[in-house]
Amino acid sequence: MQLPDEAITYQYQSLLPPPAEEWNLLTEARAKQFLSATRLKALAQQIMQVRSQVATERELQNPPPELRPLDSGFIDLPQKHLDNHRRKGEASDLGKILKIAGKLKELTDRVIILGIGGSYLAAKALYDGLVHSYHNELPAKTRMGVPRIYFEGNNLDNDAIQDLLELIENSCVDPDIRDERYGIIVVSKSGGTLETSVAYRIFRNEAVKYYGPSSELLKQVIVPVTGATGKLRDLSKAHGYTEEDVLTIPDNVGGRYSVFTPAGLLPAAVMGLDVRALLLGASSMTRRFLEEPFERNPVLQFAAVNYLMTEEHGKSIRVLGVWSKKLEALGMWYDQLVSESLGKLGRGPTPLTVVQTRDLHSRGQQHQEGSRDKMFNNVVIKTPRTPPVNVAMGEHNEDELNQYNRKGYPDFMGAAYRGTTQAYLDTARPMADLVMPVLSEHTMGQLMQMLMLATVIEGRLMGVNPYGQPGVEAYKRNMKQILKNG
């Protein structure tokens, strides 16, 4: 297990009013809007039983109809990857992923990742969170062999895909030059999602024209990631791929829980991230979830607090406030996780991601004084990855910044965070913190696994199946029918 100073924590204690607090309008408001320590304690006992249920579910080979779909394979997957890689090396799934990623990095200077929803959001969260913010603009030498990364197949926007096609056409001229080659990772578990399928046909056709229809490079620079069966697997066979050439998303892992399958791990490895550290972080969180008591278990704490706020305090909007621009895509990933897992049977919170301090200047007024239908979860990074950027003394002080001489961006961010927290508490706006010691592969692995596990626990507490997304299928059926009829 990770060292204590590497462990993420969930700090919700400010939501528990201190006993014997003197009565005033604020304490009365907090009593109504915040948590009851007695109720939380009672739910903590119940949630331990739910944990046992979820732990048992992951071992079911043939689940009963009332539990289907049951896509709980993500829970043990990180440790399985690490164990199998230790035993089998390159022959393991992780070994195969790392080998293919190495080949893509060796052969290309650009990689286009095609996918939507769970086949895209996790990879984008890892890219934005852990890769240099201006990675694609860095010189090749500074990127140390890591290709430029582009995301498509996540929309049906004609102008956006045309822009990327023009970029490739103008920057990739000679396929014999490594720095002018591009690769494609196409991710679709079912293989039938229209947004990704259409984009794949377009980019594959462009690649065939660029490399030549009989080029040996095609199967090396175009990598399909899909389910054990489905249209993309069948299409890959038709293109001459063998089973070894196609990476598989396990049947028992749903799309939005697939970050630790090839859907997330192959892009992460191509980006130059430490995939083993990512998996170690996730595995350590699974152990904490299964073994630790409620008092030291961020999965159970997060699920309990947010369940109570939504179900019993009427906080139907769940705001994830990320105190780093680099975590906005993580928030979008969590938005999908909550929406598709819990938004069922007329219930479930509405997730909303805000980036602080940016969105304090847009949504802050409504959050501070608007309707009391929100629960705020901050994601706070204690230590920045880079040295502080400080303010220096200026010859002219019309901006009045000389008073902040030698203070840096971490000081300003910390002051904004503390000021916002105090302002929300002073008006009885419920807020809790997910604290990351630093932003790294290990802590991102922990955080993503924690949020997935907490979502499953919350779904079971609500009495809804956290797996499957039947509501999403309706628009797909309608869209395809309209296209056929048109």
Image: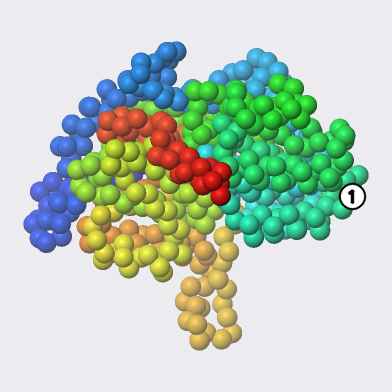
The foreground one among 413 and 222 is 222
The quadrant in which residue 456 appears is: top left
Rendering coords of residue 437 (x, y %): 48, 44
Q: Is residue 309 toward the left or the right of residue 101 in the image?
A: left
Q: Please say whether residue 273 is visible from this viewpoint.
A: no
Q: How many marks?
A: 1
> Which residue is at a point 72% across and 25% down the rendered structure image?
237
Rendering coords of residue 463 (x, y %): 27, 30
The quadrant in which residue 267 appears is: top right
Rendering coords of residue 97 (x, y %): 68, 29
Q: How is the image coloured?
A: rainbow
425 relative to 227, above or below: below
238 relative to 209, above or below: above
Disc 1: which residue: 174
Identity, as a three-letter code, of the amino acid under mark 1: Asp
Rendering coords of residue 393 (x, y %): 56, 77
The foreground one among 61 and 362 is 61
> Which residue is at a point 48% across and 33% down the rendered structure image?
257
465 relative to 396, above or below: above
> Which residue is at a point 67% across and 26% down the rendered structure image?
234
Answer few, some or many: residues within 10 Å of disc 1's Cα (few below 14, many 20 plus, some between 14 and 19). Answer: few
